[in-house]
Image: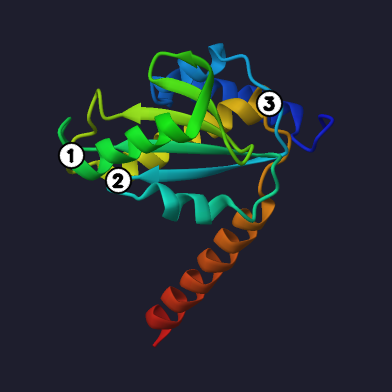
Amino acid sequence: MAKHGMPIRDKKLISRYLATHAAPEVRDAARLVMDHYKYCLIIPAFQEDWQKLQRVWEKLDPDCLIILVINASTKDEPLTNRLISDIETQSKALCSSGPLTCLTTHDRRTILLVDRCSNPIPEKQGVGLARKIGADIALTLINNRQVLEQYRRRRQITRVIFCRRYRQASQRNHS
């Protein structure tokens, strides 16, 4: 086992996945020189309000990296453009690579901003692709030990949902 709980064999598997299936933004994430964070939160943002987003992370540990994937299906989406403007006035850029910018806010939160407005996400792929981009970046940062802990509760919730669905399907088949 690796130091923080990720088996070594999983690291090779993850590296192979990232090399073949990951979103192109992953290459930019690997180039960023950032601090290390205890964990991360992925937020796909479309037509969101800055104040509402701040309420989402205000109670989080400051050691949490917020991966904010801003997406729009067109370059001229007014609410999304306002969000970008608010981010620019409420934070300071630390480093950037391609469409990724690492920012720090006035309340000392670190945001990894993924700009998918300049290269809009196709309308039918919207939030799904934004989540995948964020998850691929998070996986890269975990694999590179820039994010130290994996969120294990999600895995437990997924396992419970799968077991419940499997039981329901089995009961229907035997009825």
Nearer to us in this view, 34 or 1: 34
Q: Is residue 48 left or right of residue 141?
A: left
- Which residue matches tag 2? 46
The disc, 2 or 3, on the residue closer to the chain's N-terminal end is 2
The disc, 3 or 1, on the residue closer to the chain's N-terminal end is 1
Marks 3/1: CA distance? Answer: 33 Å
Marks 2/3: CA distance? Answer: 26 Å
Nearer to us in this view, 39 or 175: 39
Q: Which is closer to the viewer, label 2 or label 3?
A: 2
Task: Determine whether the residue tagged by mark 2 lies in a helix, strand or loop.
Answer: loop
Q: Is residue 96 left or right of residue 127?
A: right
Residue at point 59%, 52% (across, down): 58
The disc, 2 or 1, on the residue closer to the chain's N-terminal end is 2
Asked if disc 2 and disc 1 are in contact, CB closer than 8 Å, the reply is yes
Task: Determine whether the residue tagged by mark 3 lies in a helix, strand or loop.
Answer: loop
Residue at point 64%, 56% (across, down): 59
In the image, residue 97 lies at what x, y percent?
46, 13
Residue 11's disc is none
Residue 75 lies in what quarter of the image? top left
Residue at point 59%, 67% (across, down): 160
Residue 8 lies in what quarter of the image? top right
Asked if disc 2 and disc 3 are in contact, CB closer than 8 Å, the reply is no
Which residue appears farthest toward the bottom when viewing the image?
175
Residue 45 sits above or below residue 56 on the image: above
- Which residue matches tag 1? 77
- Which residue matches tag 3? 146
